[in-house]
Amino acid sequence: MSTWISVEKAAVKYGFNKEVIILWAEMKRFPVGYGEPSPVIDERSFQEFIAQMKKGITSEYIDTLEELCIQKTRICDLYAEIIGAQDKELLRQREKIAKIDQIQAAMKMQNDRIVDCKKVFAEYGRPFRDSWLEKLRRSLRRLLADRKS
């Protein structure tokens, strides 16, 4: 029956760096379980792997390490591509926000002009209704309306 040991305990017990043990686990050199709070490894398989490593590094080990590096490089490239796409999208959104800000500024300026025009019409509209010219215009309209009837 296999016994499981945390990566931290294995690092202390066998004198290896924790990151190296995790790398070997990623290379599938021995069974690993990803649990909380840290990964655990099969201690007997780990001991067998260490015994093989003491005999010397094999070409299979180097090939596996190279394949793992290639996979990690692909993952990094994908992350870089995703980050680049996110940067482009962020730039587009900032451009849209700048355009919206310009439109809002123009709308505010137009609204201020409309308010000013309403004030002017309100100010000068009343005196015109009460002026002699307006009274004359209303009288003429009534006369013309009476003539048509």
Image (spheres, helix red, strand yellow):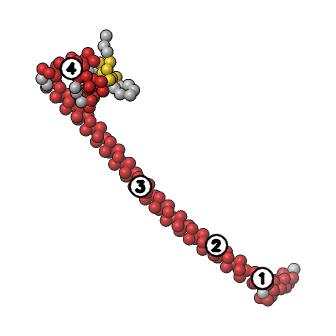
Q: Residue 129 carries which label?
A: 1
Determine the image quadrant of residue 45. top left
Q: In this view, does 82 lie above or below 69?
A: below
- Residue at mark 3 to residue at mark 4: CA–CA distance: 52 Å
Mark 4 and mark 2 lie on one chain; the one further toward the N terminus is 4
- Asked whether the beta carbons under mark 1 and mark 2 sit within 8 Å of each other, the answer is no
Let me know if residue 137 appears in the view.
no
Mark 1 and mark 4 lie on one chain; the one further toward the N terminus is 4
- Asked whether the beta carbons under mark 2 and mark 3 sit within 8 Å of each other, the answer is no
- Residue at mark 2 to residue at mark 3: CA–CA distance: 34 Å
At numbered mark 2, what does the secondary structure look like: helix, strand or loop? helix
- Asked whether the beta carbons under mark 1 and mark 4 sit within 8 Å of each other, the answer is no
- The label nearer to you, 3 versus 4, is 4
At numbered mark 3, what does the secondary structure look like: helix, strand or loop? helix
Look at 64% across and 72% down and name the residue there: 115
At numbered mark 4, what does the secondary structure look like: helix, strand or loop? helix
Q: Which mark is residue 92?
A: 3
Amino acid type at mark 2: Val
Instruction: Judge from the rendering whether residue 50 lies leftward or rightward of residue 8; answer left or right.
Output: left
